[in-house]
């Protein structure tokens, strides 16, 4: 191809990929990390989109699902925290790599390399699932506030939605993450609760390292919910888009500048995602353990409210358990809802060529912010139809568990396409783990449907 034709292609691709203004890097640049002499500071500079993704994965839907699993099935699902860790880490790294190598989010890759019907089907499913998930998370935030301040839950729904949308439009995702992501550390209280509940550690170790499989509907339903809330579709799109924003924050404002990734950059993204997923699964594991050692052990196997789940903390802090649980739910909810609605907005904006980015001014990206607002407020309306909040959180996870497998197949096909990824296609280990994740999730979803009565 001649130089003139190459320049024309590059100009056309740059025009097709709108610039995303970004205030500052979420994590340190490669140069900053290399120059940092303090090993602790260097480690934290490594962390960015992967850590935020891991923190957002422990959203109210996740905590509700894990609490339900522990309360209803005891220690039987502890092994899933071990099995899902490598699956989550590899899948999220693959998504990050797609964003870094192509310079586009997942929707942008689908738009330029695959059928528009496939793109629109994937984005529509994502928008529906994210809207439902965001709505149930908003309901959980209101329920958690109600544990501290006895205000009617329904009265708080719309104000909470307004606050979240306002923060996204007039603030930035970095502001939201800096304020709220550390509140999720309160969920580590479940670690202490689990130990102080004095569980049978022989049984715990056995359940952790020897999978206990049942093929009845309730067990498979819970398994699908766990997989759906840990390997969630919205995180696929979010991770890729945030890596694109990360590159733009380093001055790579055109598609031509963003394309490609060095070994050092990919290694940085790999450790970022591993740490983020490890953080997520530590909380995931001990929420199940605490609920199993307290609620299931005492015969309370059917959670009906956030108050029921809070009881799992009582062995550690007595009456303060309710407040600690509430703080964790509020923090994780305020972190997760912008990720949910933001990932939908990224996907839709890329599909139609709109300007996008959580640091883009509202006047420059009206459609992008409109999607965020619509998704948030439509989701909020779910809370006015009388659904039990814990049940809503659980079923949201089930929906994600059904949608994730076909999306995983798409992601694995993209990441092995040499026309898209060049020399950065997946290696054998990545392919093995990625396809294993898809097979496991398909099998669980099919088993759940097959045993439905």
Image: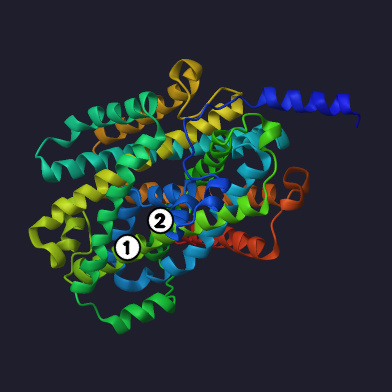
State yes or no: discs 2 and 1 in contact (Cβ < 8 Å): yes
Describe the element under mark 2 as helix, strand or loop.
helix
Q: As displayed, is residue 206 above or below residue 64?
A: below
Looking at the figure, which quarter contains the N terminus?
A: top right
- Residue picked out by circle 1: 69
Q: Residue 445, image x and y in percent?
A: 50, 57
Q: Which quarter of the image is occupied by the C terminus? A: bottom left
Q: Is disc 2 surrounded by few (<14), some (14 to 19) or many (20+) residues within 10 Å?
A: many
Residue positioned most to the top: 363
Q: Nearer the viewer, residue 213 or 155?
A: 155
Q: Can I make out residue 136 in this image?
A: no
Instruction: Please report the residue visible at 29 percent of the width from the left and 62 percent of the height from the top.
Output: 287
Circle 1 SS class: helix
Residue that appears at 44% across and 19% down: 362
Q: Is residue 7 left or right of residue 191?
A: right
The residue beneath circle 2 is: 225
């Amino acid at each position: 191809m001649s130089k003139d034709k190459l320049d024309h292609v590059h100009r056309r691709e740059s025009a097709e990929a709108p610039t995303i203004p970004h205030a500052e890097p979420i994590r340190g640049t490669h140069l900053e990390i290399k120059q940092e002499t303090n090993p602790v500071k260097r480690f934290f500079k490594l962390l960015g989109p992967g850590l935020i993704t891991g923190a957002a994965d422990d959203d109210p839907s996740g905590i509700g699902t894990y609490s339900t699993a522990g309360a209803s099935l005891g220690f039987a699902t502890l092994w899933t925290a071990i099995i899902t860790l490598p699956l989550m880490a590899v899948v999220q790294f693959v998504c990050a790599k797609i964003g870094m190598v192509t310079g586009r989010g997942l929707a942008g890759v689908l738009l330029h390399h695959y059928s528009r019907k496939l793109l629109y089907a994937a984005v529509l499913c994502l928008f529906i699932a994210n809207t439902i998930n965001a709505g149930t998370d908003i309901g959980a935030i209101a329920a958690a506030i109600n544990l501290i301040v006895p205000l009617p839950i329904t009265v708080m729904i719309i104000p909470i939605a307004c606050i979240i949308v306002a923060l996204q439009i007039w603030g930035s995702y970095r502001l939201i993450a800096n304020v709220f992501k550390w509140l999720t550390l309160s969920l580590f209280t479940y670690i202490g609760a689990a130990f102080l509940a004095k569980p049978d550690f022989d049984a715990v170790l056995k359940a952790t390292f020897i999978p206990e499989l049942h093929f009845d509907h309730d067990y498979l339903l819970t398994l699908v919910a766990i997989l759906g809330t840990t390997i969630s579709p919205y995180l696929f799109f979010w991770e890729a888009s945030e890596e694109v924003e990360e590159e733009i924050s380093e001055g790579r404002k055109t598609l031509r500048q963003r394309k490609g990734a060095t070994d050092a950059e990919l290694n940085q993204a790999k450790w970022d995602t591993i740490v983020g997923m490890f953080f997520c699964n530590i909380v995931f594991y001990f929420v199940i353990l605490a609920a199993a050692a307290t609620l299931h052990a005492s015969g309370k196997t059917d959670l009906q409210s956030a108050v029921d789940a809070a009881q799992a903390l009582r062995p550690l802090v007595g009456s303060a358990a309710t407040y600690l649980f509430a703080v964790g739910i509020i923090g994780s909810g305020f972190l997760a809802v912008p990720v949910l609605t933001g990932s939908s907005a990224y996907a839709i904006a890329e599909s139609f060529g709109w300007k996008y980015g959580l640091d883009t001014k509202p006047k420059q990206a009206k459609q992008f912010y409109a999607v965020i607002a619509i998704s948030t407020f439509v989701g909020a309306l779910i809370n006015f139809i009388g659904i039990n909040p814990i049940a809503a959180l659980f079923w949201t996870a089930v929906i994600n568990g059904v949608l994730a497998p076909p999306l995983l197949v798409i992601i694995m096909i993209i990441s092995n396409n040499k026309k898209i990824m060049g020399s950065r296609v997946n290696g054998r280990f990545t392919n093995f783990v990625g396809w294993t994740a898809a097979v496991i999730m398909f099998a669980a979803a099919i088993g759940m449907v097959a045993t439905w009565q």
